[in-house]
Amino acid sequence: MKAIELREKFLKFFEEKNHKIISGARLIPENDPTVLFTTAGMHPLVPYLTGQPHPEGKRLTDYQKCLRTDDIDEVGDISHLTFFEMLGNWSLGDYFKQDSIRYSYEFLTKVLNIPNEKISVTCFEGDKDAPRDEEAAKVWEECGIPKERIYYLGKKDNWWGPAGETGPCGPDTEIFYDTGKEKCCDECSPACDCGKYVEIWNNVFMQYNKKADGSFEPLKQKNVDTGMGLERMTFILQGKENVFETELFEPIVSMVKSKASMPNDDSLRVIADHIRASCLLVCDGVVPSNIGQGYILRRLVRRAIRHMRKIGFNLDDISALCETVINSLSNMYKELEENKENIIFQINKEKNRFVNTLSNGEKEFNKITSKLKEQNEDLIDGKSLFRLYDTYGFPPELTAELAKENGLKVDMEGYNKCFKEHQEKSRQGAEGVFKGGLADHSEITTAYHTATHLLLESLQRILGPHVMQKGSNITAQRARFDFSNPEKVQRDVLDKVEAMINEQIDRGLEVTCEEMPLKKAREIGARGIFDSKYGEMVKVYTIGDFSKEICGGPHVDNTSKLKHIKIKKEEAVSSGVRRIKMEFVD
Ligand code: SER
């Protein structure tokens, strides 16, 4: 079975169980300042897991593009990926453990025809925060999974979330496929990473909210959040050894291999994974840079380039490689084909930037290592790491990898210190890189969110209807808003935009929300992106007589709750895309 069929079968199965198929979100979370990327299917659904009603109801299913950056440096082995797709189904205060487990079992054994004997499961063993999950285990037994294949494990293995520091979480039951390999030892279990058991699905029973003080409180409703890794399930169904042998990766790996003079498996996998993730990131609006999402993209492209050089892959073939990636995935992600030109352009631009300094950087690295070896030392200090980064464009993680290959270590702490000093001096990077913590829907970010609706409408009225939102990012200090416009917006025009927004704030306009089918939203002239599924229910936020926009919320209920805004900066992001930063002023 091909990945695309698996995706279709999954959605259809849950649709038949009265789930609504919703559209997945972009890789960059909208209006969520606390995380860089969407890391799980539940991520865009946090407001609904914590009690807001979802316009499509209480049973949902979708496929979601995800990117996990924790183990970029592990990619190269057979199991780690940065970008992957997660298939998921959700109950928002509707069914719970019983049905969730029964649905999973039915899908695996009846639709995918996986024999019962191949399935092992784990349940939460219980601790001070939540009881031993005998309820889940009992349902598994009723489904026909014998006790010997039901394992109880602790929080480390059988608890999911919150995705950041706080938010929805709960015990989970994980489903494993037994590859048939010999047990590695008597204690071999799904907790073991010897390769006998592969995790294929995770059913999380989200019934707690983790608070900032580390304690858990019951959520308003008991939810189910499941996630199945599409790439993994695909290789298992195809009887392959790993994801790189499936149609999702094979054309990419083959292309690189055929053009490399000294291919090795690790490098082939790094290149295939990183360029695939990079294409999808650019497609969702990320541009290589030194901060935030752009920095992750930069690291991916540069690490891939280093491996290309290592295996003798001509860097002039990067465009052809991007095309291979896009072709191999265009039936899965139609947006890739539409953004092909920009993807190839951005990745090449980053390649050129890196290549210009790469060989000098390598010389510098060699100088550092020979000096260390002469002195019988094995630690590259923070200053050298910083110089390699600042002058030669070597992300410190890349230097660390090179160092490891040469039997050396790096002083990351020292690097961070140098970086900070530099940052203070040049007042750069003030934006910070946000890690951990789920959407903080605090009053101030909610207010900024409403202000971005006023901004979009004002830009469209003043600059013209070509203005489209290209992304936004909100922190407690400011709102950043990207939009399409062919040229710089002059200060006098920005002043007009600012005045128009502040006028709406002074008018004290009521903000209301209505749920309606996408088609109706389009008919009533709501602004928004109309590439979602036809017939899907959406929320439209109306701000008095001023703006109508499709949006998940949340928003203030009256514009009088906002302070006046000031547009602090207007700059280019990429060709045809501008960025505005605005702040509330007292
Ligand atoms: N949130 C859970 C996971 O990421 C299930 O979707 O595994």
Image (tube, rainbow, N blue to C red):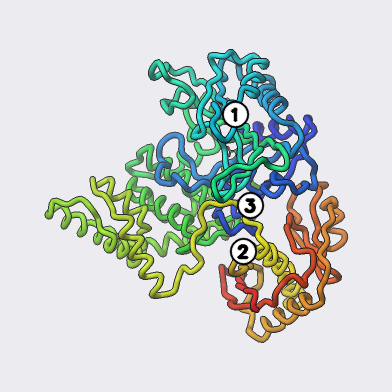
**Closer to the camera in the image, 236 or 130:** 130
Of the numbered discs in the image, which one, if any, rests on residue 474? Answer: 2
The residue shown at (58%, 69%) is 477
- Residue drawn at x 35%, y 59% is 394
Which quadrant of the figure has residue 59?
A: top right
Q: Identify the mark nearer the N-term, 3 or 2.
A: 3
- Residue closest to the eye, 421 or 525: 421
- Name the mark nearer the viewer: 3 or 2: 2
Read off the residue under disc 1: 131
Amino acid residing under circle 1: Pro
**Does the residue tagged 1 have its C-beta within 8 Å of any atom of ligand 1?**
no
**Are the residues at dot 1 and dot 2 in contact (C-beta closer than 8 Å)?**
no
Mark 3 lies on residue: 26
Which secondary structure, mark 3? loop
Q: Nearer the viewer, mark 1 or mark 2?
A: 1
CA gap between label 3 and label 1 equals 36 Å
* Image disc number at residue 55: none
Q: Can residue 280 be seen here?
A: no
Q: Say which quadrant the N terminus sits in.
A: top right
Query: Hey, what amino acid is under mark 2?
Result: Ile
Q: Amino acid at mark 3?
A: Arg
Dot 2 crowding, Cα within 10 Å, few <14, some 14–19, many 20+ = many
Mark 3 touching mark 1, by CB under 8 A? no
Picture coordinates of residue 523 (x, y %)?
87, 59
Which quadrant of the rendered structure holds the C terminus?
bottom right
Q: CA distance from mark 3 to mark 2?
A: 16 Å
Judged from this view, the residue extending furthest toward the front is: 128
Question: Which numbered disc flags the more N-terminal residue, 1 or 2?
Answer: 1
Q: Residue at x 82, y 58 (%)?
A: 513
